[in-house]
Amino acid sequence: MCVLCYELAPDDHWSDGVSDDAARTLPGRARYRRTRLLSVVLAPYGLTVSDPGSGPQCVVADRKGAAVVAAGLPAVWRAADELSPRRLDVLDPTLLAALSPDVAE
Amino acid sequence: MPKDIKCVFGVDVDAVGGWLGSYGGEDSPSDIQRGMFSGDIGTPRMLRLFQKYGVPATWFIPGHSIETFPDSVKQIVDAGHEIGAHGYSHENPVAMTAKQEEDVLSRCVELIEKVSGQAPRGYVAPWWEMSNATASLLQKYGFTYDHSQGFHDFTPFYARVGDTWTKIDYTQEASTWMKPLERGEVIDLVEIGANWYMDDLPPMMFIKKAPNSGGWVNPRDVEQWWKDEFDWVYREQDYGVYAFTIHPDVSGRPQVLLMLERMIEYINGHEGVSWVTMEDAANDFRKRYAFPGSQGSPFMPGSV
């Protein structure tokens, strides 16, 4: 927990590819990259991800006004499962088709 | 020059359509019931308010509300108010395909013509978000004015479409994003400025699915805010359009109805103010400043 803002530290998740110590606090560039990747991954599910720019949170939203503040990847995936009309599946052909090799660059 | 401040009530009957399209309420019986309140209870209450003060209003009614609340809509029409378009289920235009957007607009035009005997002249984009297709669709369906763009606030202007800007992509060189916004072209569609600070909904409607929901702002604080805006406009402008954007979902509640009574009485205490429909305000603006052409200024000379 942060002693200044009383926010709980976000949980780890196996899907977090940015796991070295420097990226743990997600300084600007790594944070930007993560938000961008999450946006690409969740777009086929009709969801958006935005970064308010402070704290560990991002906002996962559908296109009909429902939004969830999520801190850390486990919370992001839970939010996406809750908001998406389709269950998230890492082997979903629609998702795989939407991803391209250059997205990760 | 004599003072001429035109005051307008734009009333968006979002109701159930709002909860389906924009406020995340599609799975909540409670939210849907609040939408029903808007159409069945809030709308007649607001009609009584307008009748009490002899104020005309422009009601932007989603197709969903027209079909769900035929009695309330008939009361609006019978009272002589103007009817404008506002989506079917308050769908965000930027989330729709161009075909979906046209299907929604054409259906809503048809519904409005059926209940009021006249095709709508005015439009409010749900969430005030115009897509790349919206402006051409409005012109195709004969709209003469819109109340969605925020380029100006208390002086009407002509719509501008096609502005382009560059987003920052931190994976690229900085030189790729250091570019100014490029203005698009001005079109022959009058805009009565959309202004979040004249909207009752963000501060006074509780939305469970919005992380930053308002809903608990004291209407007396909003009243002071709106009076300050009016006072500035009245002091600085000889001509202006002071347009409220309100919703029966919010303004149909007693605490807001009483505040609106105080606002109307406050405004009526000034010389040179009048209450008009949004169409009348738009038509009057055309006489003051004719369409300047696609490369002209959208703003009337001298507007502050």
Image (cartoon, coloured by chain):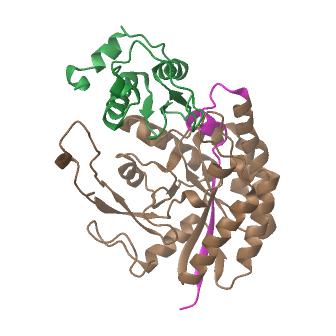
Chain colours: A green, B brown
Q: Quadrant of residue B100?
A: top left
Residue at horizontal 55%, vertical 30%? A68
User: In front here: A56 or B33?
Assistant: A56
Vertical position of residue B130 compared to residue A83: above or below:
below
Q: Quadrant of residue B241?
A: bottom right
Please say whether residue B9 is one of the residues in the magenta stretch.
yes
Horizontal and vertical percent for residue B76? 71, 54
Which stretch did the figure color magenta? B1-29
Horizontal and vertical percent for residue A1? 57, 28
Please give left or right for residue B176 compared with residue B246 in the image: left
Residue at horizontal 25%, vertical 25%? A103
User: In front here: B38 or B108?
Assistant: B38
Q: Does residue B50 appear anywhere in the picture?
A: no
Please give left or right for residue B188 compared with residue B110 in the image: left
Residue at horizontal 49%, vertical 50%? B128
* Residue furthest to the bottom: B1
Instruction: Name the image quarter holding the C terminus of chain A.
Output: top left
